[in-house]
């Protein structure tokens, strides 16, 4: 993947629901510029970026800003701010090997392995029982749990002395 570019052709969401329509549209826009080469992060489990290294400078943008793009709004400002490190944390960016291949195989689950993000309006899960569902893209099953959360709220309110 280091030498070739990430291409939109194999990930058209019209052919398979597991692919992101936003990611596909963004990749189509990049064809007019320079296609990204890889995915990056500062360390495992942190924010993902898509782009390329150019003479040691990273040119790209946050992947989540592409996936969560709202129709009618401008696209994320990618491919405009070269830097050698993540401009948010200041940590060096490291290529994530195999992520493109994972995306081709299991779709958006490659970007969200813990299944925390919601991808409306498509159907991602098949209900197996009342509290059990299966992801149609990667095959993982999830049981719904409920927990009671007790919350203490502390705030400052205006003190009005009592008149005696």
Image: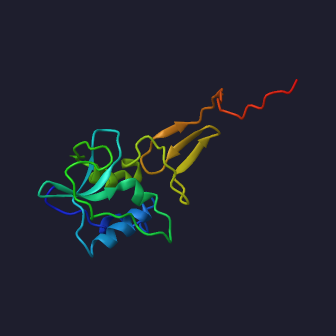
Residue 1 visible in this rendered orientation of the protein = no
Left/right placement of residue 128 relative to residue 4 reads right
| Colouring convention used in this rendered image of the protein | rainbow
Instruction: Give the percent coordinates (x, y) of residue 5.
Output: 20, 63
Instruction: Give the percent coordinates (x, y) of residue 146.
Output: 63, 31
Q: Residue at x 27, y 42 (%)?
A: 42
- Is 115 above or below relative to 51? above
Left/right placement of residue 15 relative to residue 31 reads right
Q: Residue at x 21, y 54 (%)?
A: 83
Left/right placement of residue 43 relative to residue 12 reads left
**In which image quadrant can residue 152 be found?**
top right
Left/right placement of residue 117 relative to residue 110 reads right
Which quarter of the figure is the N terminus placed in?
Answer: bottom left
**In which image quadrant can residue 50 be found?**
bottom left
- Is 135 above or below relative to 157? below
Which quarter of the figure is the C terminus placed in?
Answer: top right
Q: Residue at x 27, y 44 (%)?
A: 90
Residue situated furthest left in the rendering: 55
> 17 or 163, which lies in front?
163
**In which image quadrant can residue 38 be found?**
bottom left
Residue situated furthest bottom in the rendering: 32
> 41 or 96, which lies in front?
41
Instruction: Give the percent coordinates (x, y) of residue 153.
Output: 65, 30
Residue situated furthest top in the rendering: 164
Residue situated furthest right in the rendering: 164
> 143 or 30, which lies in front?
30
Instruction: Give the percent coordinates (x, y) of residue 126.
Output: 55, 48
Q: How many marks?
A: 0
Residue 89 visible in this rendered orientation of the protein = yes
């Amino acid at each position: 993947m280091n030498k070739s570019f990430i291409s939109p052709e194999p990930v058209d969401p019209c052919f398979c629901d597991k692919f992101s329509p936003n990611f596909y549209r963004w990749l189509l826009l990049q064809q007019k510029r320079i296609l990204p080469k890889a995915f990056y992060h500062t360390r495992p489990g942190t924010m993902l970026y898509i782009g390329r290294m150019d003479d040691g400078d990273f040119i790209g943008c946050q992947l989540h800003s592409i996936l969560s793009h709202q129709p009618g709004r401008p696209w994320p400002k990618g491919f405009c701010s070269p830097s050698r490190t993540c401009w948010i944390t200041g940590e060096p960016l490291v290529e994530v090997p195999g992520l493109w291949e994972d995306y081709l195989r299991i779709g958006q689950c490659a970007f969200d392995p813990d299944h925390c993000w919601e991808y409306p309006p498509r159907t991602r899960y098949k209900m197996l029982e009342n509290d059990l569902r299966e992801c149609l893209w990667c095959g993982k099953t999830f049981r719904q749990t409920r927990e009671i959360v007790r919350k203490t709220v502390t705030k400052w309110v205006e003190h009005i002395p009592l008149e005696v």
